Amino acid sequence: MSMKSRIPLILLACGSFNPITNMHMRLFELARDHLHQTGRYQVIEGIMSPVNDDYRKKGLVPARHRVAMAKLALETSDWIRVDPWESEQETWTETVKVLRHHYNESLRLLQYKKEFIKNKQPLEGSTENSLSSHYTVLPELKLLCGADFLQTFQTPNLWKKEHVKEIVEKFGLVCISRAGSDPARFISESELLTKFQHNIFLVKEWIQNEISATQIRYALCRGLSVKYLVPDSVISYIAHHNIYTEESERKNEGDLLQPLRLHNTTVSPLND
């Protein structure tokens, strides 16, 4: 299939991005290459959605910093952008609702474009080389994640079963492999994931790169170099605002993640 006849697709990654690392950005590149190689899709946009502060993850610094760092890191990308909508909500928003929001936004944008095409008026802010400005059918939206993300579906009370079903059935997943995780096993052990495995794309990371945001924070707290693991612009921002300290790592310590809190469970918090 030619690029023009392929299905337009948007990749959405939800996460802490605390801080954003080179690996976070590599996930998008790996996913786009894989989807293009299927011959079915044309990836038109990547969206990075930092989680709301109310998620209560240990060591989570304010969203305004995480969004700012992500914007700096993505200044050199011509197809990935940061969207602050999730982080700007009053409370933590379930992932499926973030997917619904961006799906509805893509629908609204498509209708807007069709109306302008119908009236033969130029699109405000459009550019000739913008991939997303040329599609005329509703793009698919898929959730981009690391393969170990699939394992979290098995964590009691972390996910609602109906939400997992909607994510894998209506949207789909693009999972990047990571050392130590076996996504195929996670799928086979889940009746629901097995049922919709046709909508789960497993992407092999051909250069193993286990950059961990947690390890980055620990290094920064100890005054160690993280150069070439994190973009220079982000390193400068962190230094200027003195973001990652021993005190910041204790933030939300002992708290339950918000989804677990909402389910009134007594399980231990996820502190990674």
Image (spheres, rainbow, N blue to C red):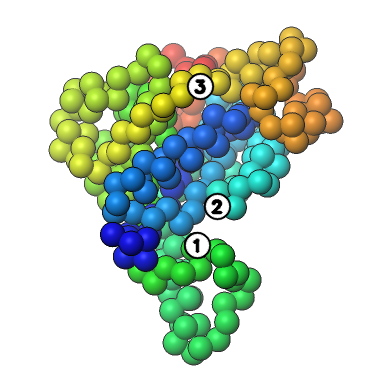
Which residue appears at 44% of the width and 37% of the height?
30
Mark seen at residue 69: none
- Which secondary structure, mark 1? helix
- Reading the image, the residue beneath label 1 is 131
Tell me which amino acid carries mark 3. Asn
Which residue shows up at 41% across the image and 22% down it? 178
User: x%, y% of residue 91?
Assistant: 55, 42
Please state the horizontal and vertical placement of residue 92, each as a whole percent of the image: 52, 39
Residue 50, horizontal then vertical, whole percent:
57, 40
**Amino acid type of the residue that numbered disc 1 sits on in the rendered structure:** Leu
Q: Is residue 258 left or right of residue 42?
A: right
**Label for residue 79?**
2
Tell me if residue 177 comes above or below residue 112 in the rendering.
above
Disc 2 element:
loop
Asked if residue 156 shows in the view, the reply is no
Most foreground residue, 237 or 43: 43
Q: How many numbered marks does the figure carry?
A: 3
Q: In the drawing, what numbered circle is on residue 209?
A: 3
Residue occupying image coordinates x 48% and y 30%: 258
Residue 236 visible to the viewer: yes
Residue kind at label 2, given as amino acid type: Trp
Residue 140: image location, x then y, percent:
35, 56
* Marked residue nearer the N-terminal end (2 or 3): 2
Mark 3 and mark 1 lie on one chain; the one further toward the N terminus is 1
Disc 2 packing (10 Å; few <14; some 14–19; many ≥20): some
